[in-house]
Each structure stands twice: as C-alpha cells, then as structure tokens.
Image (cartoon, grey):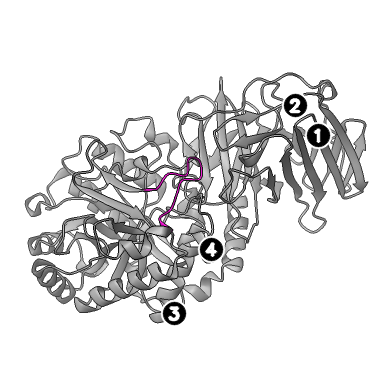
Amino acid sequence: MRISKVLMTLPLVYSLTVTAASSSPKVEAQTAPSVARTESPSTKISVEGQKLFVESKNFTAEFTGACLTSLIDLKRKTQFCRRDESAFPIELFFVDEDVLKQDKKQKIEVKPLSDLAARVVITGASTDRELFVRLDPVTGDLCVTPGGRSLRRRGLLSVRWNISFTHEADIIMPCVNGIFVENDRGFPPNARFGWPWGWNAQLVIVEQNNCSLMIHSEDKAFKYKSLNLFRNDGLTTLGFESEQVGPVWQNDSAGGVEWRLNTYEGNWKTPAKRHRGWMNRTYNLEEKRANRPKWVDDISFTLQWANADVNLLEALAKVYPPEKTLIHLSNWRTSKYDIDYPDYIPSEQAKAFMKKANDMKFKVMLHYNFWAVDINHPVFQQLRQWQVRSVARNELQGWYWPPTTYDYTQMAYIHPGSGIWRRILIDAVLNSSRKIKAPAVFLDQTFCTWNTDNGMVENMTTMEGMRQLQEEFVAIHPDIVLAGEELHEISFQRECFAQAHIFDGWGELKPHHIPVAHPICSFLWEGHTRLVGYYHLNPSDKDVDIGIEVYRRMGAIPTLICNDPQLIRKDQPTVKKIIDLAQKELSRQGR
C-alpha cells in the first residue's frame, strides 16, 4: 500500500503549512464601519464613494473597496461575513509562496457601470488589481471575477480573493472527500487546496441559523483554482484563487474565474443540490452512465489492496454475498507492486484467482497506474521528455522510494496529455485485463491532475489529459467499469468507484479526525460514483475503529483491508463491524 506516495510529490496546491492571510497596513478607504442595507431588494448594484451595495432577491451585500464586509440573508436576517483587518481582500500569490498584500502608493476606486455591474480597481506602484462585480438577473447570484497584474515582478501563480466569515458560521468544504470546519475546533489547521485534486468540487458552503451561503464557480474550461483556508481564534477566512496554468516563471497576471454567491433556506444540501444538478447537466452524466453494467449499483461491500490468494475468496464468501462484493486486486502481476510499469503481465496466481473469482461472481478490479513509468523500463526513453515538472520549482516529479535511497522503485510521472503514453497504457491495460477477464479496471493516482511547469502537452493540461484517457477507454469499450484513486469533479465523470483519502490521514488517526469528516462529496457524486475506503481499515490497525467511523461519515461503501483469510470471519470484531454496516446499507437500499 502506498501510504506516503502522494506526500512525496505534493505540488504547491496542497499544503498544511502555507502562507495565509496575515496582517497588512490599513487602507484609509476601507476604514469606514460596515452597515449593510437590509431593506427588500430590487436586484441592483449601487455605489456610494468607496462602498458598493448589492441588493438581490435573497440577500444584501456590502463591499468596502474590494473587501466583502457584509452579506445578510434577508429571510433569516443572518449575517455571514465580517470585516477582518488582518486579511487584504485581493492578494497576489507568487510561485515561491510569497504573498503581496497592500501595495505602495495604493489607490482604490469603486466604479458603477450599471444597475447590475460595478468594478473595484486597486492600483499601486507594483500592481493592478480588480474585482468585476455583477448581478445575474436570472439566478440572483452575486458574481465576482478577481484579476491581478504584477507590474514589476514575474512568477505570479494566482490572484486570491479573501472572504472572512462570522464566528457563528460553520464551513463545509468538498476538499479531500469532505471537510467540516467548526469555529470551536482547532482542527483542521490552515491549508491550501488545489482544484481539482485537493479541492474536489469548485464550491464552498457556509451554514448558519438554518440557512446557507454557497460560493461556487460554474467554470467549464478546466481553469486551475485553489482554496486557501486560514483560521485564527475561531474565525475563518477563505481565499478563492484563480491560478495560471504553468509555466509561470515569466507570468505577471492571473484571473478569469468567476465566483457566484447566493443564500439558501435550510442546510448545506440545498445549495449542494444546485451544484450537483449543474454537474449533471454540464457533464452529461446520465448519458455517461447509460452503458454501465447493472452490477455496479449492486456493490455494497469492498475489499481493498488484495493479494492474489484464492483463500481470500473462500473466506469472503462466508461473510458477504460475492455478487455484491468488489475486490481491488493490487498484487497480481509478475512484478512487485509499483515496479516495472507499464509491464502488466498477470502471474499464474492471478490467473487462478480471477478464474475462481469470476466463477463465484465476485467483481474484481485490477490495479494499474494512470501516469507512472519505471525509469528503468525501455519505454521510458520514449516518454521522458513528457515527465511532469513541478510548477513551483520545475522539478521532475515521480514516485521514488524510499526517499533516502530510492532502492525499491523509481517511477516517473508522465503527462497524460501525451498521446504516445496514452496508447501505450491503453494497450497494456486492455491486453492484460482481457486475458484474465477482469470485470473492472482500477487506475491509480487519477486524482493527480495538478498544475505543472510543463502545463500543456498536446494542448492539454494534466486534468484534460486524464479525461482524454478515460474517454478513449470508453470509446473502445462503452461498458468498461473504471475506478480510481481519490475523486474530483473531472475524474468522477467516468469512474464508477474511487478510493477515498482522509484529510491529514497519512499517519495514525486520532479522535479529532471524526467530526471533521463530512459527506458533501459523496452527496455531490451520488447516483454516479461511489467512494470506497483507502486505509486504516485493517483489523490489525490500532486506529481501525476511527477509520471505520470516518469513512461512515464520509459516505463511503463499507470497506475491509485484510490479506489474512483466517481473520476474515463473522466473529472477528472489525470484520463484523464493517459487514454490519454493509448489511445496513443493503437494508436502506431495499435490496
């Protein structure tokens, strides 16, 4: 199992210790007290000096300069936002993680453009920043597009628009499969999540007083984004970033992502349904799942990281119906795990395992990797020029283990935009999976679609290359069952199942991991893709009970990780707990 693989290759877009919104000199134009208008709105934008007032059918909002100082739901009279003197409203985030806040000789101008639009412009000695603000007359959304230019310095990665929330607000983020941020808990800490691989869907929901605020994007152009979480004494500021595709060493501008804000009656599910509906329509999800075999929906229990041991099948059949069980077969090749990719040659044990599994009606997915190539494999010489490089340091990226010696494996990550790589991988996957009649294909690391220095290959970013790979698989076999590691708004479109990480879950789980887990991601993917467990689910894990509860809260299919057939029995406590959860899910589904 690859417990540390991702940590070794984390790009700049996901970090637990990052430069967050911090103190900056006050701007005179932003020192006036914030008093939002709360009368019945007529859906309009108005400007008075440095203040910008928004009146929509559900809420009123007020900006002081570029700072959103108030947003009040009209029905519940609930205030979601606050002024934070320590957070500059529009920041420039550079590739070396330096953050430019207030500029020298800074001036702020709030310009009315019409009853439905305005522009906030911040100019200074070294920067030009702006917010284009408009009201959508159909939805009533407040739509904000930040932009930023660095006039004297290159290496600009993103422009960040900060919004600070009240102490009473709870925040739900579809990051790392769902994170719940409560003001009275110190965990999770400050972090920066890149979309789509860390920030799985381009939205955030804020709950308070039985109503909710959603900030989301309806971007369909695969523009990189990031979400910056900054917490201080129970108060939370979120930074919504528009990130430039790499390379960015000479880049001096960022922007182009529109953020939509609106309030909703009830809890987080109301706005989440709206975004789920948008994804269904935008990504044609009903059409994409039309050819899936029926058994996909019947799965209610999984075994992950299995060896090709036929004794496992006999043990599993005694505790749960095989036809409702999904097995992830990770060790099935003639080579060891994570060595010699893209050689996918089934061992004799794997052939025997697959024959027996198919006869018993288990559903098995073979483990592959969607972008890893062993540097000692002959094919690497064809592909090495497309090895991905980090956007921050232009470093070659891959999986090198152990980090002190690299004695076990050295694998290069190949940009999936490369057509040569895609055809090599597809041929290897289809030839091997057909040979032993595997019902499903598991592509490891499909979530790894971060921004890179070699950002575009054959006119595709890593996420577009991953999507193209999936589409080519489906074009060849429309009924193919694909699965992957982690899940996000792009990868989920063609995946039936996905292993789910836990936020800050690479070490031992602690009780504080439990209340942070949230089902928003499984809710967003509902009816299309289902999460399964990834780690902390082995009877020998001392934190297994916490792992089981975290995955239950996350909404994942009950999952077991165990390669000891003697432990897979109904009276084993961990197995019993997981099987009981699977049976409850069956009862809930009426199956």
Of label 1 and label 2, which has the lower sequence position?
2
Residue 161 appears in view: yes
* Residue at image mark 3: 475
Q: Amino acid at mark 2?
A: Asp
The residue wearing badge 4 is 460
Nearer the observer, 533 or 144: 144
Q: Nearer the viewer, mark 4 or mark 1?
A: 4
| Residue shown at 57% from the left, 66% from the top | 280
Q: Which residue is mark 2?
A: 103
| Earlier sequence position, callout 3 versus callout 1 | 1
Q: Toward the viewer: 137 or 282?
A: 282
The residue that disc 1 covers is: 122
Q: Are marks 3 and 2 in contact (CB under 8 Å)?
A: no
- For the C terminus, the image quarter is bottom left
Q: Amino acid at mark 3?
A: Ala
Q: Is residue 426 above or below residue 412?
A: below
Mark 2 and mark 1 in contact (Cβ < 8 Å)? yes
**Which of 290/331 is in front?**
331
Q: Residue at horizontal 62%, vertical 44%?
A: 250
**Alpha carbon of mark 1 to alpha carbon of mark 2: how far?**
9 Å
Label 3 CA crowd tier, 10 Å (few <14, some 14–19, many 20+): few
| Mark nearer the viewer, 1 or 2 | 2
| Mark 3, secondary structure of its residue | helix
Residue 267 in sight from this viewpoint: no
> What kind of residue is marked 4?
Met
User: Tag 1's secondary structure?
Assistant: strand
In-front residue for pair 583/323: 323
Classify residue 467 as left or right of residue 51. left
Distance of mark 3 from mark 2, alpha carbons? 52 Å
Tell me, for residue 448, which label it has, or none.
Answer: none
**Residues rendered magenta in the picture:** 386-397
The earlier-in-sequence mark between 3 and 2 is: 2
